[in-house]
Amino acid sequence: EFMYQQGENHMAANIQAPKGTKDILPKNSGTWQLVEDVMRDEASIHGFEEIRTPVFERTELFERSVGDTTDVVQKEMYTFLDKGNRSISLRPEGTAGVVRALLEHALINEGVPQKFYYLISCYRYENTQEGRQREFHQFGCEAFGAAAPVADAELIALAHGIFERLGIRNLSLEINSIGCPECRAKYHAALKAFLEASKSELCDTCLERLDKNPMRILDCKTPSCGEITQNAPVMKDYLCHECAEHFTAVQEYLDAAEIEYTVNPRIVRGLDYYTRTVFEFISNDLGAQSTVCGGGRYDGLVKQMGGAQTPALGFAMGMERLLLIMQAQGIQLPEPPVCELYIAPLGKQAQIKAFAFTNMLHQASIKAECDMCDRSLKAQMKYADKIGALFTLVLGDDELKHNQAELKNMKTGEKTSISLGDTFLTEFVAAATQAEDMMALNMDELSVDLESFKQFEKE
Ligand code: ATP
Ligand code: MG
């Protein structure tokens, strides 16, 4: 067999994924798909529809939306000139592209609210650690045209619903309000006055932020900045009447939905476009990278991007971090078998028959495989075992001669004789369906029921 050392360079080039990227291998992609299915389903239940936007956009789009005082734009973007001398950036997040598409296609004219979800890869040039990659994946939701506080709670409920359905425990939901441009201006002034005293101890980035966007300093990951802001004034005490009312209402709706949360005045989010409600889902199972989902309201962004004043809100969940939590909590999703029937042929004639049968099974959407490597019977059975085949069928000279073979149930060892003639498919499904009860197997796995097979054979 073909074996080579893991990581062996069998070409001159160095065969290694770029730093900060990870292959998602077949042994893991099943889990990714199951998690994504839950996300798609939950979003759909809440009336969100999928949107797909380009992996790259004009750099200016991110500078204008994410904001040029953010770490993301200042330090983390993958920016390059294309062959037409345009400045292009790989998307560091999903919201900017969605807002661009909303405006470009005037989707808001189709009625409000407009509700979108996406499953995307994102790119940020970061110091890589567990749960912090340069290519990573997000599930996100965005809603446009809903100003009422119930929309904030509904969006949080969607994210919460996904965690519940995945069986994730011990997440804390932390919420805050960062007000509107009016009340935040007063807060910024107070915060700036407070920070002025410790100016010399701030990191370089925060020193720049002090004038442009001092609230960002609360989000700084440099420990010394964290210490300085410990006793800083908080936005909560500066909210205007409308913003305070909105925040109280959001909490009432969360209470009504029995979603637990704590108000954390230090949650400010890493991106510039947020207003009023901001929230994070935080886990203890993630080490330093504790935020698995972050979001909030961004009522100013659409207008800032050239559209009409449009209330908006959204969140993004980090797929890698979510999967790390599931792993830490020992959560395993049931994966359907890769193979329902493995056919083991011995000899040329049998191989032709095996191929014809698997082809027929495939047309009926049944997962089936036959030998592709000219293996011995023993090696074939070992393979069938490895791929978790539910049933196997050996085809040798005798079986072909009598047009009859033994279907072996790999879980119970039980054997059933089935015909290799026209009724093969029906007999297989009948045997498999019967075994289903005995094995107490949930065979949604067997995708089609007996009746539809009879139908199929008549055609
Ligand atoms: P952090 O504070 O951890 O850097 P952030 O505020 O930059 O996060 P957002 O821009 O809000 O993160 O992105 C939403 C979610 O995407 C995060 O909560 C996290 O789960 C995930 N995420 C962000 N950056 C990365 C990354 N480099 N690698 C993996 N996941 C990430
Ligand atoms: Mg970040």
Image: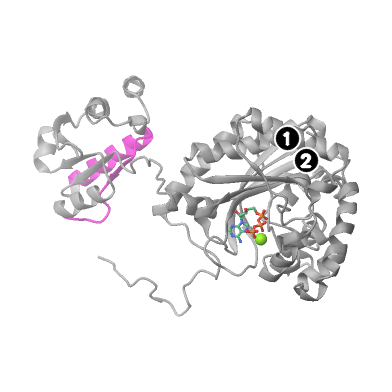
- The residue carrying pointer 1 sits among few (fewer than 14), some (14 to 19) or many (20 or more) residues within 10 Å by Cα, namely many
- Per the rendered image, the range of residues in magenta is 349-376
**Residue 371 falls inside the magenta stretch:** yes
Colour pattern of the rendering: one colour
Q: Residue at x 22, y 28 (%)?
A: 435
Residue 391 shown left or right of residue 203 in the figure:
left
Tell which residue pokes out farthest to the bottom in this image. Answer: 12
Between the C-alphas of marks 1 and 2, the distance is 15 Å
- The residue carrying pointer 2 sits among few (fewer than 14), some (14 to 19) or many (20 or more) residues within 10 Å by Cα, namely many
Instruction: Give percent across and percent down for residue 434.
Output: 23, 25
The residue type indicated by label 1 comes to: Val
Q: Nearer the viewer, mark 1 or mark 2?
A: 1
Residue at mark 2: 312
Q: Which mark is residue 200?
A: none
Dot 1 lies on which element? helix
Instruction: Give percent across and percent down for residue 294.
Output: 66, 49
Q: Residue at x 50, y 62 (%)?
A: 22
The residue type indicated by label 2 comes to: Ala
Residue 143 shown left or right of residue 121 in the figure:
right
- The answer to whether any part of residue 197 appears in the image is yes
Question: Up-down: is 322 above or below 114?
Answer: below
Q: Residue at x 58, y 38 (%)?
A: 160
Q: Which mark is residue 250?
A: 1
Q: Residue at x 10, y 36 (%)?
A: 401
In terms of sequence position, does the residue under pointer 1 or pointer 2 come before the other? 1
Instruction: Give percent across and percent down for residue 63.
Output: 80, 60
